[in-house]
Amino acid sequence: MRVGVDQDRCCGSGMCVLNAPGVFDQRDEDGIVVLLDARPPEGRRREVRDAESGCPSQAIEVTEE
Protein backbone atom coordinates (compact mmCIF):
# COMPACT_ATOMS: atom_id res chain seq x y z
CA MET A 1 0.00 0.00 0.00
CA ARG A 2 1.21 3.45 -0.90
CA VAL A 3 -0.44 6.65 0.33
CA GLY A 4 -0.28 10.07 -1.29
CA VAL A 5 -1.87 13.39 -0.40
CA ASP A 6 -2.65 16.52 -2.37
CA GLN A 7 -2.17 19.42 0.01
CA ASP A 8 -3.64 21.82 -2.54
CA ARG A 9 -6.97 19.96 -2.43
CA CYS A 10 -7.05 19.53 1.36
CA CYS A 11 -9.72 21.55 3.17
CA GLY A 12 -8.36 20.84 6.65
CA SER A 13 -11.34 18.85 7.99
CA GLY A 14 -9.09 16.51 9.99
CA MET A 15 -11.00 13.33 9.11
CA CYS A 16 -7.74 11.70 8.03
CA VAL A 17 -6.16 12.27 11.44
CA LEU A 18 -9.25 11.00 13.24
CA ASN A 19 -9.29 7.82 11.14
CA ALA A 20 -5.56 7.12 10.85
CA PRO A 21 -3.43 8.95 13.41
CA GLY A 22 0.21 8.15 12.90
CA VAL A 23 -0.28 8.05 9.14
CA PHE A 24 -1.67 11.58 8.85
CA ASP A 25 -1.27 14.79 10.81
CA GLN A 26 -2.22 18.42 10.22
CA ARG A 27 -0.14 21.58 10.00
CA ASP A 28 -0.66 23.78 13.04
CA GLU A 29 -1.02 27.00 11.08
CA ASP A 30 -3.82 25.97 8.71
CA GLY A 31 -4.90 22.38 9.35
CA ILE A 32 -3.68 21.09 5.98
CA VAL A 33 -2.86 17.38 5.87
CA VAL A 34 0.69 16.17 6.48
CA LEU A 35 1.59 12.63 5.43
CA LEU A 36 3.63 10.90 8.13
CA ASP A 37 3.86 7.41 6.61
CA ALA A 38 3.58 6.89 2.85
CA ARG A 39 3.86 3.11 3.26
CA PRO A 40 1.93 2.15 6.37
CA PRO A 41 1.99 -1.48 7.53
CA GLU A 42 -0.66 -3.95 6.42
CA GLY A 43 -2.37 -3.74 9.82
CA ARG A 44 -3.32 -0.11 9.15
CA ARG A 45 -5.00 -0.80 5.80
CA ARG A 46 -8.57 -0.42 7.04
CA GLU A 47 -8.02 2.87 8.85
CA VAL A 48 -6.10 4.32 5.90
CA ARG A 49 -8.90 3.30 3.53
CA ASP A 50 -11.42 4.87 5.96
CA ALA A 51 -9.39 8.08 5.90
CA GLU A 52 -9.36 8.05 2.11
CA SER A 53 -13.11 7.50 1.81
CA GLY A 54 -13.89 9.99 4.59
CA CYS A 55 -11.88 12.84 3.08
CA PRO A 56 -14.41 15.48 1.94
CA SER A 57 -11.99 17.02 -0.56
CA GLN A 58 -10.64 13.71 -1.91
CA ALA A 59 -7.09 14.79 -1.11
CA ILE A 60 -5.92 11.27 -0.22
CA GLU A 61 -4.98 8.64 -2.76
CA VAL A 62 -4.23 5.04 -1.79
CA THR A 63 -2.74 2.60 -4.28
CA GLU A 64 -1.95 -1.05 -3.87
CA GLU A 65 1.53 -2.21 -4.79
Image (cartoon, rainbow, N blue to C red):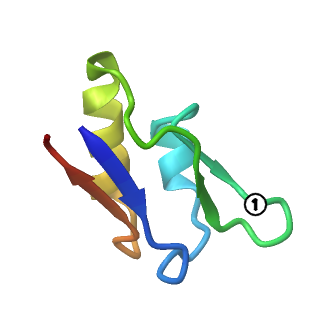
Q: Secondary structure at mark 1?
A: loop
Image: 20 above or below 41: below
Question: Across the whole image, how many numbered discs are drawn on residues?
Answer: 1
Residue lying furthest top: 43
Q: Which residue is mark 1?
A: 27
Image: 38 above or below 54: above
Q: Amino acid at mark 1?
A: Arg
Q: Quadrant of residue 45?
A: top left
Q: Where's residue 3, x and y in %?
A: 35, 49
Name the residue: 53% across, 83% down.
Answer: 8
Name the residue: 34% across, 39% down.
Answer: 48
Q: Where's residue 41, x and y in %?
A: 34, 21
Q: Residues within 10 Å of mark 1 (few under 14, many from 20)?
A: few
The quadrant of the rendering that contains the C terminus is top left
Q: Where's residue 25, x and y in %?
A: 64, 47
Residue lying furthest left: 65
Q: Where's residue 16, x and y in %?
A: 49, 50
Name the residue: 39% across, 30% down.
Answer: 40
Left or right of residue 56: residue 7: right
Q: Nearer the viewer, residue 50 or 32?
A: 32
Residue lying furthest right: 29
Image: 63 above or below 18: below
Q: Quadrant of residue 12?
A: bottom right
